[in-house]
Amino acid sequence: MGVEKTQIVIPARSNRWKVSATSVCGSSHEKLGTPCQDASFWSIQENDIFIAAVADGAGSATHSDMGAQLASRTAVETLQAEPDLESRLHNNPNTFKTILTTALKAALSAVKKEAKTQGIKPRELASTLIVVIATPQVVATAQIGDGAAIIQTQDNDLIALTTPDSGEYINQTTFLISPGALKTAQLHIWHGKPTHVALFSDGLQMLALQMPFGKPHAPFFTPLFKFISAAGETASVQLTSFLQSPRVKERTDDDLTLLLAALMDDTHETENQI
Amino acid sequence: MSEEPKLEEIEFAENPEPRCPCVLLLDTSSSMSGSAINALNQGLQTFKDSLTQDDLASRRVEIAIVTFDSKVNVVQDFVTADQYEPTSLSAGGATAMGTAIVTGLDMVQNRKTQYRENGITYYRPWIFMITDGEPQGEAKEIIDQAAQRIKTEEENKSSAFFAVGVEGANMDKLQAIAARAPVKLNGLNFGEMFVWLSASMQRVSHSKVEEQVDLPPLGWGTV
């Protein structure tokens, strides 16, 4: 089983985010010999600003693994370059849409440009895209296509900030390169202090959400969020083996990506890379 | 169909997997008797065996079987492949194809309503019709209505309708009824046809690809 991880460390003076991102290749992809088409990318900025993206490449597209990586990376890098993210998100009710749309647009242009360079159609780089900016005061999310972004609040409530966008049929969704995709983007802001953030690709929908309503499934997230808060060096290995375990695999044969982040209390200075 | 409350809907709690419904409309008119119906019966067993080799497909693909001769019989309402037990079909009578088509399309629409009411996600339904003849013993309006329904549903992507002609089938007539080009079965190669159908349903039930699924090549017939 192929495992692909995208983890980077951005040194931050006082970091309170603990993050783990894991992608595993689905059994159907192994059967067909296609690569893992999910990608994730994240970064921690000063002042505990956490930026992350997850993209799920279309199974039918020839270069969607590349498209997913490019889209998630470009979205995160675009947001990294945005100044005063927290205060702009927190103080002005409308800026979050502009900020998030900037990231989506940048990802789309990067994908289109890459398609041109490679001499292929943009649809061969098709992927979904979920983007999150989380700070101790506010969480903003954008999503095109399926998968979802979930947070846990100080009161242990689970909130789905986005829900999977599929058509009548479960195998239909919108991709970043789909015509008019930016207009369909779900853009949300939540004001408050999150304890946890999770982004995941549609492969986990059956386990993580009460479908088709998109409500977060507490028996799934509660243990995972506890785990990430307490996790040590073996967290990544443990998450990978969880995603590869028979109880997960018997419910899905798709690529799976699960990005988990915990915002630790001030007293817990932590290593963000686990 | 009965209007009594159905406890069977608990099946969706036991098995919350997305569903991939497939209705088989099978011609059991008298011309199918003998080797054709035997080959078809064996083919149904092959279909079941082939689907259940795939764990997810066996819990996602739902099979319903409607036979048509002088009348239309729902011999199997929707069940997942793991629950399906093929029964032996026998042949005799006329060819109430138009009524069977409308029955199949209605079953699919009702099933979708059940999925939605029970919070079950689903894939685009398939209706797969196998005949060795042409409509017989039915008013022209019924056949026209069936053809129109197929056309509308294909346009709305409500379902996908495939017609297969066994030796002796009126392929021109099938072409006129089905929106897609009908496929002519090679001899009585139902075995290979059902292996293909199973593989196609597996691909659909594993797909997450906008709506275009590349189907395996047709080794068992010609368009």
Image (tube, helix red, strand yellow):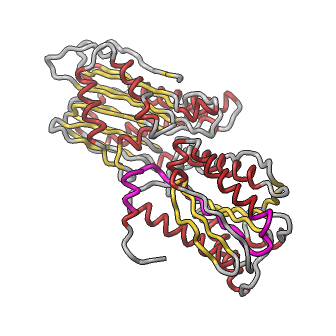
Please check the rendered image and state whether residue B21 is part of the magenta-colored stretch, yes or no.
yes
- What residue do we see at 57% from left, 63% from top? B64
Q: Is residue A86 visible?
A: no
Instruction: Using the image as rendered, state which of residue A269 and residue A176 is in the foreground.
Output: A269
- What residue do we see at 70% from left, 65% from top? B129
- What residue do we see at 42% from left, 27% from top? A76
Q: Is residue B187 left or right of residue B148?
A: right
Count how many numbered circles sit on residues in the image: 0
Q: Position of residue A22 (x, y in %)?
A: 42, 25
Q: Position of residue A50 (x, y in %)?
A: 31, 26
Q: Which residues are magenta?
A: B9-37
Please check the rendered image and state whether residue A197 is part of the magenta-colored stretch, yes or no.
no
Depicted B203 relative to depicted B27: above or below: above
Find residue A36 and report its image quarter: top right
Q: Is residue B223 left or right of residue B51?
A: right
Find residue A157 and report its image quarter: top left
